Structure formats: C-alpha cells, structure tokens
Image (cartoon, rainbow, N blue to C red):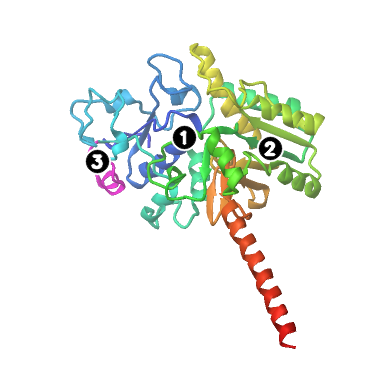
Amino acid sequence: MNMSNGRFLLIKAWSYILWADVDHVLGQLLVAELTNRIPVVYWPTHCMHNGYILTNGFELFFEPVSNYTIFDVAKPEYTYYPPIWDNDNLFIEDQNKETWVYRNIGDLLSSEANVVVADVYYNIHELIPFVKKNHPTYGMSAQQAYRYLFSKYIKLKSDIGSEVQIFYNSWLKGNHPILAVHVRRAAIDMIFDTRDPQKNGNQYWNKIYRKYKQIPKKKKKKLYRLFAKGKFKEPNLGYHKEIKKYIDKYNVKKIFLLTDCEDTLKEYKEKYGTMLVYTNCKRIKNEEPVYHMENPMVVRRRGIEIIKDAYIAAKCDFFIGNDFSNVSHGVTRIRDWADKNIKMMYWVFKKRKYPVNVMLVVKSDKPNIFIRAARRVKKIFSKFKMSKEARGDINAK
C-alpha cells in the first residue's frame, strides 16, 4: 500500500475516547483491505487525549498506518463519499454523523469515489459477511480478525514502547505467573433496571452506541426496598472471586491493576498488599466527574498512561477485564491470548448482558408487600376453613 492508486479510506475519529477510536480504526482498516483502498487515519485536535494544535492525534501514540496523510487526500480533483465532503472541509467534524445518512456499509464498500470518509463505527462482526475467500481474515472469528489487524497496523511510538518495557523489567519481569485486572470506576450515577429492559439499557444493543445516564431519585431506591420490587447488585462485585480462582489454580505471584479510580486502588492495596503492582497515573474518586487536563503536554501524557497500562497488561499471563470496556478489549487484541487465560466481567440477567461497573436492579425473589399480605389472608382463611370443617365432622359424629 505504498503506491497511490487514487483510492483512499480516510478514517476519522468516532468517539474521541482513545481505545474506542482504536477499535473503530481496526474495523475501518478491514474495510480498507476489502475495498483495496489506502488507509489514512486522522484524529483531529479536539480528541480527548490530543492536546496539540494542527497535529494528527493518532500519530501522537502510534505510527502511521500508511505513507499518506490527510493532506494527500485533500485534492480538488478528487471525488468524495459521503457526498457531504470535499477537499475544503475534510478537517472539520460532521455534527450530523449520528444520523447515519450516506453511511450504509454497502454504500461505503461499493463507492467508486477517490476518497471514502469513515467516521462511524462498524465492528468486525458486521464486516465478516463481506470478507471474500482470497482475504487473510476469511474463516477467522471476529477476535482473530481483530488480532490480525492489530498486529499488522498498530505500532506504538518508540518512546511509549520503551516506557512499557522499562516498567515491565522493573516491576514484573521474573515474577510470573502474573494476573492483570482491569476495573473501571463504578458508574454510581447509572442504574440499569432489568425489570423493564425495553425501556432501560437499550443503548448497548442498538446500532448507535449512545451513552445514557439515568440518575435515580433517592425516594425510588427506598421504594424498591420498601415494597421489595427489586434488589440491587453493587458495581464491580465478583472481581475478587475471579481473582481468587486464578491465584488458587495458577499460583499467581503478582497482580497488575489497571484502574481509573482511587477508591478501587485503595481497596486492592488493602486486600492484596505486596502482590499488587500498578502504574503512577491520574486517577479520580468514584464521585468525581471525568477529568480533562487542558495543558497540551499533560493531555498526551494521559493518553500515554492509558496505552501503557494496556500494553503492560498484555505482557501478563492472565487477564480479567470489563466486557463493556474498550480498554479491556484492547488488551485482548494486542496479542494472541488463550481463551482460558481471559475472563471478561459483566452482569447477566435473563440472557442479557449489562456492564459490571453499574448498579443493576433485578427482580427480587421476595414478593412485594401486597402479595405478602394477600398470601397471609389466604393462609388465615385456609386455617379458618379447615377449623370449621373439623368442627362440622365432630358435630356429625
């Protein structure tokens, strides 16, 4: 893909969250291969982890995926798809991209334009049906395809790679088996009520992965408990149980913790002591809002910290992650893991998965106050009826 064929796929940012956009890039790299296009990745300067002006955010962390830049595809003589684009507006954001107008996967794959702009998310599962027999990913599972693309295209900047290796050599090398654990900060302002799945939680199953926050009123929480309509599952329950399984089965010597939460780090330090290893990165408390640093140098530093943690985790022997986290899925794609060495955490209720770091309301086994009262009345009536029948038998005698 070094010589231009006049066919490019410009992969723009999708979510402006670093590992989510890496996931997006991987899917579009497959599209580039399926359509014989030269991929060009461009993350604009307003990406969450890009603090520089007039730079490509992707190339602050990774090597270019081809020898071409966005400047090479912005030419007056080129045609573009979707038709909203031209050589003058490629650098700006389409504020209406979530409407998915002109972004049908079939149209993107079949377009004859010189430049196709990819700024919406398609995962590998959706692209597998379009893979032909002559492509290397033909017959692969989605996970295998992700790993193939990651290995081929995603190359760390040398300074970040050096940081990863130095940390590993200093703190983990020679201490195998090592278990890496990724625990996301508890989303205490998000509640998933499984009693009405059609109304709550559908953002994880529709095509457009929008974030939806439901802030419950305190009265509602008390009402659930008073009337026993539902019971709560606290965020991130179950991690310690899974960790114990790995320690007991594989004699794990060190635990490498990836977390963005100070409270989680404190909890794990108290529980695992000298077994625990972690990097010195920015963390916040459960109740704090997500923190955005404004200093350009610091912003890139935060991105490096996120990438560094994931690559260190990939050097471990085992991994426990969050199945709803792009960071966790990134760890599973950096190298080829054995299935038994990975455990992805999530809530499951009635065959539907929910994020493990949110509060989950499920139907209680305990009947509500009205049902209990009705059963009590029925029980008293049954006793009275039996007593009356017994007296009738005695009188008959």
Which residue is denoted by mark 2 in the rendering? 180
Mark 2 is surrounded, within 10 Å at the Cα level, by few (under 14), some (14 to 19) or many (20 or more) other residues, namely: many
110 part of magenta stretch = yes
Q: Is residue 12 above or below residue 291?
A: below
Callout 3: SS: loop
**Residue 213 image label:** 1
Left/right of residue 15 with respect to residue 304 in the rendered view: left
Report the residue that reaches farthest toward the top.
295
Q: Quadrant of residue 331?
A: top right
Would you name the residue on which mark 3 appears?
A: 102
Q: Look at label 2 and name its amino acid.
A: Ala
Alpha-carbon span between mark 3 and mark 2: 41 Å
Relative depth, front residue between 146 and 69: 146
Amino acid type, mark 3: Tyr
- Could you say whether the residue bearing mark 1 is in a helix, strand or loop? loop
Residue 240 location (% of width, % of height): 73, 41
Q: Residue at x 65, y 31 (%)?
A: 258
Residue 239 position within the rendered picture, expressed as x and y whole percent measured from the top left: 69, 42
